[in-house]
Structure formats: C-alpha cells, structure tokens
Amino acid sequence: MSAPSYETITYEKSEGVAIITLNRPDVLNAVNEKMGQELLDSLRAAERDSEVRCVVITGKGRAFCAGEDIQDLRGDYERGVNPKLGQRLLHKYNPIIRRIRQMEKPVIAAVNGVAAGAGAGIAYSCDLRIASDTAKFIQAFIRVGLAPDSGTSFFLPRLVGFSKAMELALTGEELASKDAERFGLVSKVVPTDQLMTTTKETANRLATGPTKAIGLTKRALNRSISSDLETVLDYESYMQEIAGATSDHAEAVKAFFEKRKPIFKGK
C-alpha cells in the first residue's frame, strides 16, 4: 500500500513503521482545520495498512504541537461571536483521540518540543511517549479561560496522579521533560538529536512484535481503566482466547521448544 501525501503533515513508511510528522513549524504545528482532517486520515490509513505495525507521531521544527490554531477562529472572536468549541471537539479532536486509542497497533509520540493544549492531548493519548530534553508539556487551557479537552482530563490524572494533574490543569504551568519522566508521563528522555533514532529503535522493536497481541493488550488496558476486577478477569479470558488462536502465538511456542527467537508476522 503506497503512502498517502498531504499538505500539513508528512507520512513516511519504512520497515513496518509509519511516521506521521505534523508539518506547520511556523505556527508551532498548531492544528488548523486542514491538519485535523489530514491527521485523522493518516491515522486511518496507517490502521488499514497491513504493512504498518507501529505508528509514530512527531512534529517538525521546535514544537510537537501547540494545540488549536486560534487563527481559524479569529473572525468569530473579532465579530464578538462565541465559536462553537464543543462542536469543534466533537468533529475535529475527539475522532483523532479515539482513533489513536482504538487502533490495534502501538502508537508512539516522539515529543520534540512543546506539547500544549490539544497537542498535549494527542501526546497523552499515545501508547508511549519519548521526549527530547527540550520538550515540555503545558495544560494551556486555563491560560485562555477554558476547561481541559482532547482527552487531557482523562489521561493526565491516570498518567501523573490526580493531585499533580489538578495542579497542572489549574495553574497551566509547564512540565519539563525531565519532570515528566519523573512523574511517569514519558517513558524516556533523550537529547534532541537522538530523539528520532531512539524512537525508531523502539518502533522497530514493536513493529516486529506480535501485532495482534499488542492490539488485544491495548483493548484490555483501555477496558481496565473504567472496570471492576470481575469485569477485567472475564475480559482477560476473552482476550486470551483470541490471542491463543493467532499464528504469532503458535510461532512463539514453536520457537520456545526449538530454543530460538520467534519471528512474528503480526497475524
């Protein structure tokens, strides 16, 4: 399957990894209407493509993503019209967050710079976050008199704990990458010039893993966040029945008996 082309993002595919790069560096990769549509389309393309077994999202330039491009709404504000922000979330950001969470492939955020507002939400929704030593996360909503959106009120407390999440949401203070690592928000912090090399190493490892089992793992952990123990135990039984019937599981067992490393095909 050939890689699609876009105006506001780039999409590269190599060795089972799709790299989606937000490409509006002059505005810190703020998300306008076009970028929102193209990001969602690229995620769908990666999800459909059987050759893609891991997805990386990053930003071009000195920012990961500064969130909503306020220029899209300037006309409304200057006319004194309240923009329908809830509707923008329903049609623009919420589908992106859902696609990342529901995609049964691992998604890594390579956070190269500031991730603010909805941009932070995109990073939080990914399965793993690897950050440069110059990256920072900002719950910017309170700075402009807004409440959290783009999944940030869901993910942040679960990543850093309720008390720290409340502090960040109420103050809008920056969280530097090293502090983000300390609170468990990111998996690893590396020098900026090593970010993509490190991310690609992790992505390649996941892309050669048992893709079906990874997808089932995402399903199970997503379900566990809002379920009681009995529900989780039942769901684990259901997931394991599916995983046990995959070719990758059979290959892993065969490799175990043959004392060799398994070769997973993602099936």
Image (tube, rainbow, N blue to C red):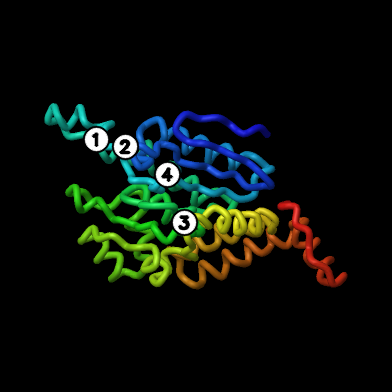
3 vs 2, front mark? 3
In this view of the protein, which residue sits in the foreground, 33 or 20? 20
- Relative image position of residue 167 (x, y in whole percent): 24, 66
Please give the name of the residue rendered at 49% of the width and 45% of the height, measured from the top-left corner: 99
Position of 164 with respect to 108 (left or right) is: left
| In the image, residue 171 above or below residue 121 | below
Residue type marked 3: Thr
Position of 74 with respect to 157 (left or right) is: left
Whole-Å distance between the Cαs marked 2 and 4? 26 Å
Asked where in the image residue 76 lies, by quadrant, the reply is top left
Which of the marked residues, 3 or 1, is nearer the chain's N terminus?
1
Q: Residues within 10 Å of mark 3 (few under 14, many from 20)?
A: some
Please give the name of the residue rendered at 57% of the width and 48% of the height, measured from the top-left corner: 55
In this view of the protein, which residue sits in the foreground, 2 or 110? 110
Residue type marked 4: Gly
Which of the marked residues, 1 or 4, is nearer the chain's N terminus?
4
Residue type marked 1: Lys
On residue 88, the disc is: 2
Q: Residues within 10 Å of mark 2 (few under 14, many from 20)?
A: few
Position of 67 with respect to 260 (left or right) is: left
Which of the marked residues, 3 or 2, is nearer the chain's N terminus?
2
Please give the name of the residue rendered at 20% of the width and 27% of the height, measured from the top-left corner: 75
Q: Which residue is mark 3?
A: 192
**Contact between labelled residues 2 and 1, with CB atoms less than 8 Å apart:** yes
Q: Which residue is mark 1?
A: 84
Q: Which residue is mark 4?
A: 61
**Contact between labelled residues 2 and 3, with CB atoms less than 8 Å apart:** no
Question: Callout 3: helix, strand or loop?
Answer: helix
**Contact between labelled residues 1 and 3, with CB atoms less than 8 Å apart:** no
**Contact between labelled residues 4 and 2, with CB atoms less than 8 Å apart:** no
Q: Residues within 10 Å of mark 4 (few under 14, many from 20)?
A: some
